[in-house]
Amino acid sequence: MHRSLLTGLFVCILSAGVPAIACADTAGDSGTQAAATAAVASPSDVALPTEGADLAMWNATPASAVNAEPPAGSMSSARVSRLLHVQKFASGIAARGAAMASMLTRNALRFLGVPYAFGGTTARAFDCSGYVQHVFAMTGTHLPRTADAQFFAAHRFAGKPKAGDLVFFQTYEPGPSHVGISLGGDRFVHASSSHGVTVSTLHDSYWSARYLGAKRVVH
């Protein structure tokens, strides 16, 4: 009877100890699987990445990343939108400027052959500044009456003259005393005292020696 009691007690001890040993062996062979099993069984016990941890290894994104500033060198959508708006606005200005220049040169060439008259401001006869003033007025742009006043009213710019720019010369008196309208490149149209409204070139020896420069009215 004592032997039976001892045998039963020994069996109970073995029965209680085997699962514990089995769990210990499993954890020892594969700690990662045990951690994953624990995570599924008890989500509240899952460890979270500490600040500065390699989040790629955790396959997680901290909540603060949602509101974080964009990385250096990148642009926010608002800034990109502003840049696109500025580019569109600049393109519109350039297109209007090109259209205005084209209109100016077409109107200017309409008067080829009109005779020169000092003080002339109409299509019957022009002087140089009267001609320029008349052509610009046809596009709704008001210019002063004389060549020197037109010189100071226009704006300097870098580069070579484009169609619609004003080109100035020093002829019968010091300072800007003659003006024409650039056709682009080295050609310009003007009211010449000897030929009336005509096209000349800046490379001509007479005009190149007296050339003061170009200025811009239409941007």
Image (cartoon, rainbow, N blue to C red):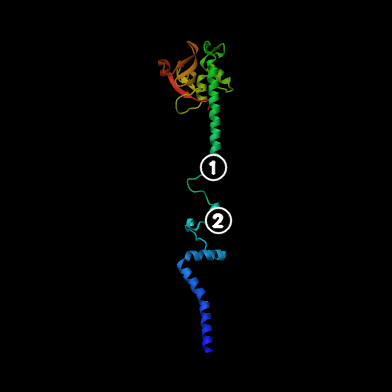
Q: Nearer the viewer, mark 1 or mark 2?
A: 2
Q: Position of residue 116 (x, y in %)?
A: 52, 11
Mark 1, Cα crowd under 10 Å, few <14 / some 14-19 / many 20+, is few
Q: How many callouts does the rendering have?
A: 2
Q: Nearer the viewer, residue 43 or 193?
A: 43
Q: CA distance from mark 1 to mark 2?
A: 24 Å
The mark that comes first in sequence, 1 or 2, is: 2
Location of residue 130 (image quadrant): top right
Residue 79: mark in rendering: 1
Location of residue 210 (image quadrant): top left
| Residue type, numbered disc 2 | Ala
| Residue type, numbered disc 1 | Arg
Q: Nearer the viewer, residue 31 or 166?
A: 31
Residue 51: mark in rendering: none
Report helix, strand or loop for mark 1. helix
Q: Which residue occupies 45% across, 23% down?
A: 213
Q: Position of residue 127 (x, y in %)?
A: 52, 14
Mark 2, Cα crowd under 10 Å, few <14 / some 14-19 / many 20+, is few
Q: Is residue 56 above or below residue 155?
A: below
Q: Which residue occupies 55% across, 52% down?
A: 66
Q: Can you identify the residue that label 2 sits on?
A: 63
Q: Quadrant of the N terminus?
A: bottom right
Q: Which residue occupies 52% across, 19% down?
A: 105
Q: Is residue 11 above or below residue 202?
A: below
Report helix, strand or loop for mark 2. helix
